Structures are given as structure tokens and as C-alpha cells.
Amino acid sequence: MFISLSLSQDRGYIFNTGSPDSTLGYLIDPDNAVANRFTIDNDYVLEAMGFFISAENIESSNITISIREDNNGIPGNLVSDLSIWEHQVNLLNQTNYNLITTTDLCIYLNKNNYYWWTIEAADDSTNATWIHSNYAFYNTATSSDGGNSWEYNLGYAGAGAIFAEQVYESDAIIGDINSDFTANVIDVVALVGYILGDASLNEEQINAADINNDNSIDIVDVVALVNLIIVPPEQSPVFILEDINPASEYYGIDIGPSFFSGQVSCYYFGKQG
């Protein structure tokens, strides 16, 4: 079963159907597989997947979960060799909620791409139910032959959510011609060499060397670069106060000192490799 949905990226969710109100759902067995399609508007690193699934007993509770690329409207290859997991359905949780965390794997998802979140049988004994979402406005398709062919329709999603952390690209450092993340005398030498015709620069280096943004590399840029080195621009760190760990009891809540006065002594920023 396939599902296509584009949702706003809010508090770590890149796909979210909400919690289901019933226990009805899609059969997961050696013949029947299910996949939710989602897309993202920024680059992300996968953090966790929470989903609502049930099974009758331990023997029937083994499933395979994967994140796959889109292949002309159907699931394609794995996003990476790491984006597939064997999982045993949690039979003790009365809400049927299961969670897989992936923060140690650095699985990257690129913006404006479609991806498939799939659940399949892990062995011949699998007999599980991926519980329906509350609403039936998702683009879906079902497979009754283990994913070899699919029937497209409009219907319920397999309930759950995917969590991810947005990837932020650092702004280019003005004057950093040799891409060592700082502007210094080595960059001045490279710039002078280029102006004198003794060295060549690629397009990215030329953009970094055009200090005054006049689309020309000349002595004015040398003077501007020297001034930048002598008096570098002030850089202020940008911090967020929101707890972005989906496993935390404070997930999605601001946890800075103004909210936990006298209780917070250490802050942890970022966790991806």
C-alpha cells in the first residue's frame, strides 16, 4: 500500500498521520506489504519512526521496515544500506505504539524528493496489522504479492509519524578562497596570485574572492580582504531552546534557562554525525 502526502515540517515531524482511534488496519503478511509516501521541503536527517501496529503473538510479530527512494510512483531502492530494520512488534504496549530510533545512523533525506516508508513481513510467520489512520484522504495502493505489483487507490494511511532533524548549511565565509573555513593571509596570497595570473581559481573560489560583490576580482578585493582579516565581522551564535529529542519527555518544549530557572546546568546542541 502506498500513500502520498506532503505535510508541513513542524517540531521534527516530516510525516504524521496522528494517533488512530480504532484497531482496524492493513494486513502485513508474506503477501501483503504497506508503504506511506512522503515528501520534504528541506534537507533532513532521519531521527525516529513511531507507528501503530499489532500482532497476535511473538511468532507472528516480526516485520521489516525501510525507507526507500521513489521509483516512478512506487518504492524503489533503499535510501541507504542502513535504511532497513528488522523489528518485533511490541505486544506489551496496549496503545500498539512502536518506536524505532535512528539518530546514530545519519540517514539523509533530500528536499523536494519523494520517499516511501514501507512495512513488510520479516518471515513466513508474520501476521500483523498496521492500524489505519483516522482519515481516508491519502493516496494509497495495496500489494497482495509481496510488493511485485500494486493497485493504486485513495484511502487510509498506516498510522504513525516520522521524525527528522533539519540539515542547515553554513553560510559561505567571505574571503575563504581555499575553503578552510577561515579567511587569513593564505587567502590573500591566493587572491594576489590569481590577479597576477600566477594561479587559477574555480567558480566557487572566485565567488569567495569577490569581496565587494562587483563581479570583478582586482586590487580592491585584496584591500577588502586584508581589512576583513584585521577587523573580522562580529559573529553571534544562534541557539534554539526547543528540545528536539523525540524520546524526551520535554520533546517540542522550550527548555532554556528562562523556562527551567536554576535547574539547567548543561546544554546539548546537535547529535548527528
Image: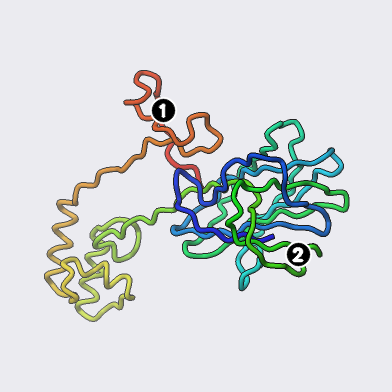
Q: Give me the C-alpha separation between circle 1 and circle 2.
A: 48 Å
For the point 46% across and 57% down, which residue is it?
A: 43
Q: In which quarter of the image is residue 1?
A: bottom right
| 273 to the left or right of 132 | left
For the point 70% across and 50% down, which residue is it?
A: 85
For the point 76% across and 64% down, which residue is it?
A: 147
Q: What residue type is labelled 1?
A: Cys
**Rendering coords of residue 176 (x, y %):** 28, 62
Give whichever of 37, 204 is nearer the camera.
Answer: 37
- Residue on which disc 2 sits: 147
> For mark 2, does the 10 Å Cα neighbourhood hold few (<14), some (14 to 19), or many (20 or more) residues?
some
The single residue placed furthest to the bottom in the displayed view is 197
**Rendering coords of residue 18 (x, y %):** 57, 43
Up-down: is 259 above or below 60? above
Q: Quadrant of residue 202?
A: bottom left
- Residue on which disc 1 sits: 266
Q: What residue type is labelled 2?
A: Gly
> For mark 1, does the 10 Å Cα neighbourhood hold few (<14), some (14 to 19), or many (20 or more) residues?
few
**Rendering coords of residue 53 (x, y %):** 71, 43
Up-down: is 117 above or below 221? above
Give whichever of 169, 67 is nearer the camera.
Answer: 67
Q: What element carries label 1?
A: loop
**Rendering coords of residue 121 (x, y %):** 79, 53
